[in-house]
Image: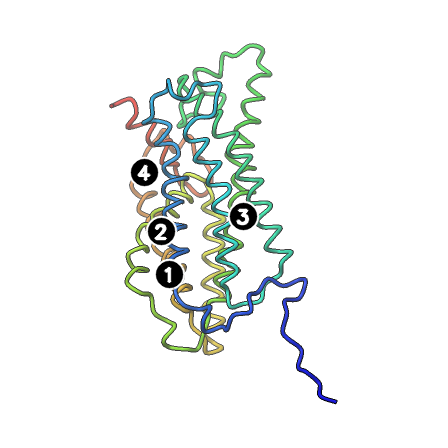
Amino acid sequence: RQIRPQSRTCTPGVLKENVPQKEQQHFHSDLWLFLTLQNWILDFGRPIAMIILPLEWFPLNKPSAGDYFHMAYNVITPFLMLKLIERSPRTLSRTAVYLCIITFVMGASIHLVGDSINHRLILSGYQLHLSVRENPIIKDLKPTSLIDSFELLYYYDEQLGHLMWYIPFFIILFIYFSGCFSSAEEQKKIPVCGWLLLGPSALYYWYLVTEGQITELFLLTFMAMVAMLIHQRRKGLSPDGNGLFLFYSFSLTVLLVAVWVSCLWSDPVLRNKYPGLIYVPEPWSYYTLHIKDSR
């Protein structure tokens, strides 16, 4: 009796495509390009669209252009992250990936609501470089319990929303990076398109770290990537083109953040707004403080 070999199928707890590893490890220029474009347009471009487009088009009691940008970001980004994970040569847990994506969408959606209201407050005179209680349009509210409500809104927008948004985002990138190691020399190169995307990618991560106030989370992820790199090199493995692109992007981001902090190191107003151990001002706080009123 002839026994047929069993076909390899994906087990329930694993997210893995039945594609040869060598084929999976080519440089993902399409995904990196789409991620970079949508990050710049839908995330960085979101507040710019709200400033440029006429207010008459988007009444204050209706969603703004930036809100629609944010909605699109909340759908497109998790889709692209899932596609990136699908191309990873490493076998990954479905449970971990799905939990990260669900948490990411929930955190980004919390931020959508908080950021939408925050933008309307800016149009009414809210100053981003001041704390909630120090803002002229907030500090004299009656009853004073309303100020607590605005501080709760700030907490959901700038703290809880950011953490639930960015922690799973960087976890997914790190999981992907951990699978980007190979012993094949021909795979350890970044093509020309990758080098062209490196600057815009790093500059966006700079914006993400500074505006999102997630310096500690980013540095922790970067140090984990360095530790993973050292560990894999001891095993004779090196990152492929995708891993190098991600690592170089993060390395350049660290440099950009350091330059940003050094340029604003002696600013007394921003120092008062960001009194913590790690001083990293937000770009939009700098805008409302030094650029908006001088236009």
CA distance separating discs 1 and 4: 29 Å
Q: Decide if residue 123 is on the left or right side of residue 91.
A: left
User: First in sequence: mark 2 or mark 1?
Assistant: 2
Badge 2: how crowded within 10 Å, few (<14), some, or many (20+)? many
Give the residue type at disc 4.
Leu
> Residue 265: x and y, percent?
33, 39
User: First in sequence: mark 3 or mark 1?
Assistant: 3
Give the residue type at disc 3.
Ile
Q: Which residue is mark 2?
A: 201
CA distance separating discs 2 and 1: 9 Å
> Which callout, 1 or 4, points to the residue nearer the camera?
1
Give the residue type at disc 1.
Phe
Q: Which residue is mark 4?
A: 264
> Which callout, 3 or 4, points to the residue nearer the camera?
3
CA distance separating discs 3 and 1: 20 Å
User: First in sequence: mark 2 or mark 4?
Assistant: 2
Name the residue rendered at 30%, 59% in the picture.
193
User: First in sequence: mark 1 or mark 4?
Assistant: 1
Badge 1: how crowded within 10 Å, few (<14), some, or many (20+)? many
User: First in sequence: mark 2 or mark 3?
Assistant: 3
Pointer 2 with pointer 1, Cβ within 8 A: yes
Q: Point out which mark residue 245 bears.
A: 1
